[in-house]
Image: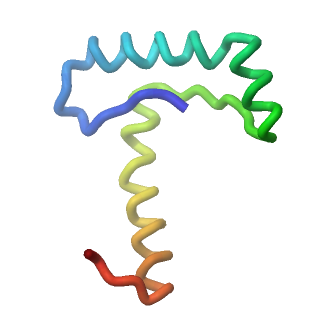
Amino acid sequence: MGVGDDGKHAGAVINRLNTEVAAILKLPETERRFAAQSAEVDIRTPAEIRGMIPADIAKWEKVARDAGMQKQ
């Protein structure tokens, strides 16, 4: 988890927001709440998230296409 963007926004703003979100995700209470739902906190940098977006889009486009779904 983390905060990323398409690279068109001020890097300092995205980095600061990501730092604050990461701090909240590291809190023991947050970790307990995630664990209660069988989830884990996995903090990512804005650059890592930005790199994941194209792969995720391609992956889910294929899933939708294979399922015969149409764009709306």
Name the image quarter holding residue 64: bottom left
Name the image quarter holding residue 24: top right
- The type of colouring in the image is rainbow
The C terminus lies in quadrant: bottom left
Task: State the image coordinates of residue 69 (x, y, percent, origin top left).
Answer: 40, 83
Q: Residue at x 55, y 17 (%)?
A: 22
Q: In the image, is residue 69 above or below residue 10?
A: below
Q: In the image, is residue 53 above or below residue 5?
A: below
Front residue of 17 and 56: 17
The N terminus lies in quadrant: top right
Count of numbered circles on the image: 0
Q: Residue at x 47, y 12 (%)?
A: 19
Front residue of 31 and 42: 31
Q: Residue at x 44, y 37 (%)?
A: 49
User: Which residue sits furthest bottom?
Assistant: 68
Q: In the image, is residue 54 above or below residue 59?
A: above
Task: State the image coordinates of residue 58 (x, y, percent, origin top left).
Answer: 40, 65
Q: Residue at x 33, y 83 (%)?
A: 70
Task: State the image coordinates of residue 35 (x, y, percent, origin top left).
Answer: 80, 31
Task: State the image coordinates of residue 59 (x, y, percent, origin top left).
Answer: 47, 66
In the shown orientation, is residue 34 left or right of residue 17?
A: right
Front residue of 34 and 63: 34
In the shown orientation, is residue 42 left or right of residue 71?
A: right
In the shown orientation, is residue 41 left or right of residue 6?
A: right
